[in-house]
Amino acid sequence: MPTQAADLPKSYDPKATEEKWYRFWKEGGYFHADPDPSKEPYCITIPPPNVTGSLHMGHALNNTILDAMTRWHRMRGFSVLCLPGTDHAGIALQNMVENDLAKEGFTRHDIGREQFIARCWKWREQYGARIYHQFEKLGCSYDWERVRFTMDPSYVDAIMEEFRSWYERGLIYRGIRVVNWDVRYQSAVSDIEVQTEARQGKLTHFRYPFADGTGFITIATTRPETLLGDTAVAANPGDARYQPHFGKMLKLPLTSREIPLIADDYAKPEFGSGAVKVTPAHDLNDFECGQRHNLPQIIVIGKDGRMTEAAGPDYAGMDRFEARKKVVADMEALGLLEKIEDYTIQTPISERSREIIEPLLSEQWFVDMKPIAQPAIDLVTQDKIRFIPERYKAIYLDWMENIRDWCISRQLWWGHRIPIWWTDAPLADSSAEGAPDQQGHAGRRHAFARSQEDAVAALGTPHVWQDEDVLDTWFSSALWPHATLGWPAETADLDYFYPTNLLSTAQEILYLWVARMIMTGLDFVRRPAESSSEQDGLLDPDGLTRRILPFRDVYIHATVLDENGQRMSKSKGNGIDPIDLIDKYGADATRFSLMQQAGKNQDIKFSEQRTDIAGNFINKLWNASRFVLMNLDAETTGDLPPRDQLTEVDRWILSRLSATAEAVNKALATYDMDDAARALYGFFWNDFCDWYVEMAKPRLRPESMERTTAQNVLAFTLEQTLRLLHPIVPFITEEIWQALPHRGESLILAEYPIGAPEWNDAEAEAAVALTIDATRALRNLRAELGIAPGIRLSAAIVSSDTVVRGTLSSHSELMVTLARLARFDVLDSSPSGEQEKWVGTPITGGEMFLEIGETLDIGKEAERIDKELAAIQKEIERAEGKLGNASFVERARPEVVEEERKRLTAWQEKQAALVERKRLFAR
RNA sequence: GGGCGGUUGGCGCAGUGGUAGCGCAGAAGUUUUACACACUUAAGGUCGGGGGUUCGAAUCCCUCACCGCCCACCA
């Protein structure tokens, strides 16, 4: 039923509309999808935001893209599942709960592990759904019946299976390594969660005397406090300065130790004195160097960031940065401080806590990544996963080829507790398993177990305890696509929707997350070779099974920066909250402004102004639709009239519509969201509103014979345009669509237009282009000559071109249209009478004349003609120059040369016409 | 140190070998069957610098500069 246009307010109110339609879609079950063998599947498992999270611009951009792709495929007839969920966000959530506790004056240790975890759950029940509501505000058509959380029981099953498999294959091992220690969170963090920042610091030069009193060696350090943990000094084996001294002992100042001077490639002769102090427990390089030389590892900085007993009585218990000062002062007092230089230090910072990372020797669980990485390298090398933009493929491969082992244990309480159980009871009977502890603890064994019961059985003793640590958050999110679809169970969802189609995310988690999903997907999900396609993954050597990839396309979206190109951050206060944008401009304007900017660039400089501008487009869409609705009758069907009833202008807009549909589909298929938005913006505003609607107005008058045709073409074109726009601006399009004549219950399921070859009409396009050109020329004349709108004018066209004459003959449809749009009343076939009263202007293929009459200012007209002639002269010179160049004529493609000739002729004709007019006025 | 992106009118961007485009801002005009969040018209650019390839370069190659991102253990 057409809505009464009078019901529609003059400007669009997003708030009420958005809520109304969201509820309609959600309650109508339009977001839900089930496996449907009659349709092709399309699936996205959306990147799970942290439960602690709130929608930021990156989410808004990503989820707009995901939802646009979702809606587009749904309209194309796929069975579409877009599965949402959240991540338990180990460190982030634990930190929030700890801060909460701190306000009450407690630490987590005060309330104990069990209580603390209960509190975390409470927190997540209270706040965990907030981001879902924000996704709904944005319009995301996700299947809310399939929400997943990384700590759901079924998801935990997947994690257990992952751990078991890797543990039993010997890929998970216990190791003592230097890890990135976050002093504030009291936990190891991964390399990826560490940022390096250039900070101003000092390079301190110390002297270490030889034990035999024969002089000293100078070393430089940025971390003087680690002196206390030094167990050697190294110099390059090729360094002549030190060759005589290798093997000699040095007296380590401030301690009672003597340490050797060793030869190691790691020392670079050109840096400082060429000698470097070696602290195996507190630096990764030093650790590796220490391994090579069997050096002792002395931990002098503890997990709390304070100096340990091993640092000696003068320092024990002191904060690491205080100790730094004291070491320098003490060395100075001993006369062993050589100098202190200003120095820019690449300082490792923990991404979450912003604390300076302390490299610390500690015992952790690791995953041996090399064997798991190889298939994920092969797969991408064979282009079975498409990276968009393509450049990320090389970035991914580079990282994968240099992959390092993954430290998966975290010293937190919130998360998945490591399913390893320990015992130090001796092996009672041979049936009990359990791997021995390689490090220290003689007789200690461990085993994988899902429960204490299992552990007792596995280790053959009731004296068991579970590992205290939890798993890195990324250990669980690495399973996202298949675990959310049911793996390790063989579910119908997994069978139908996997592999998924698209993974879209920010570039900063390409390694952290994307690479790991590819690895786990290939490692865990397999299908019989005969029931999977080659494109789905890699055939196993047995030829019977295939490892299945998690997704086909990886789209890495731009980073949203502020208008000055700075990263948005809370501390800088330069962030834009998308929820504010939605409240102020509406979700559609927010989405459209994001899509307009989502090109292939690495970043987007976003300012609120962009959304304001997009809001204008939304308003234009609203008002043009109001106009259409106001001009429809109750019986208007919106069906396309038979072709023989269509005018040239009708055929033109359908041809443009078809071209636009093709362009939009093409752009969406390659994730060129900006191209899609641009094509739609241009078509709707310029072609449809500025020209088609204006041209159609007289035909809509009640007495017009063409009223019905015009109404139907108008309604049809608008309806098709709404379909095309719906994936990007879902709310307003549904609101208008429901008011227009339509079939079906919701636009969300309307078939997406792909363009119709039979609508392509080059003839109509050319004719209307000519009309537009001529209309502009006449409007220009009026404006240039300053002719008041009220003054009656006549116009005529003169052309030697029969096509032009035919199109714009004195009584053709287009000429009538032209006359109205360019605002002249009387029409004549050619200038007659006193030529001085006419002015002319060249158009493609001819000349337009306008009768100005007595008001014509001859001086002004002559000036105008001169200006125009000068511009034409420039064009002619350019073309003549080109055609006068023998090598151009000989070597350029013939059609290019021909085109240039035609162009020249056209300019020359225009020039001749103007010269003629000028002569007239010169009399 | 390595890699990648960017540099086009005042601002934000499109354009990947054949006459430099769009949006915004600014100028002038306009109640015209919806929209002043609009309409109409005009103005505004030697496409970061230099070199090369080509009949022809914003577009391809080399080089330099600046801005930004990612990676890397340099004390």
Image (cartoon, coloured by chain):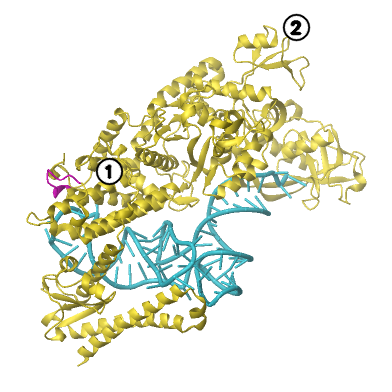
Chain colours: A yellow, B cyan
State which quarter of the image contains the N terminus of chain A: top left
Q: Nearer the viewer, residue A694 or A603?
A: A694
Q: Residues within 10 Å of mark 1 (few under 14, many from 20)?
A: many
Residue A221, image x and y in percent? 74, 44
Secondary structure of residue under mark 1: helix
State which quarter of the image contains the C terminus of chain A: bottom left
Tell me where residue A162 sits by quadrant.
top right
Question: Residue tagged by mark 1?
Answer: A733
Q: Nearer the viewer, residue B64 or A371?
A: A371
Q: Are marks 2 and 1 on the same chain?
A: yes
Residue type for callout 2: Asp
Question: Residue tagged by mark 2?
Answer: A429
Q: Is residue A260 left or right of residue A138?
A: right
Residue located at (14% from left, 50% from top) = A631
Residue A894, image x and y in percent? 46, 75
Is residue A357 at all visible to an observer of this figure?
no
Above or below, comparing residue A708 to residue A327 in the picture: below
Cα–Cα gap, marks 2 and 1? 72 Å
Above or below, comparing residue A518 to residue A761 in the picture: above
Q: Farthest residue toward the left?
A: A703
Q: Earlier in the sequence, mark 2 or mark 1?
A: 2
Span shown in magenta:
A629-638
Residue type for callout 1: Thr
Residue A584, image x and y in percent? 30, 43
Give the letter of the chain under mark 1. Answer: A
Q: Is residue A891 left or right of residue A221?
A: left
Give the letter of the chain under mark 2. Answer: A
Secondary structure of residue under mark 2: loop
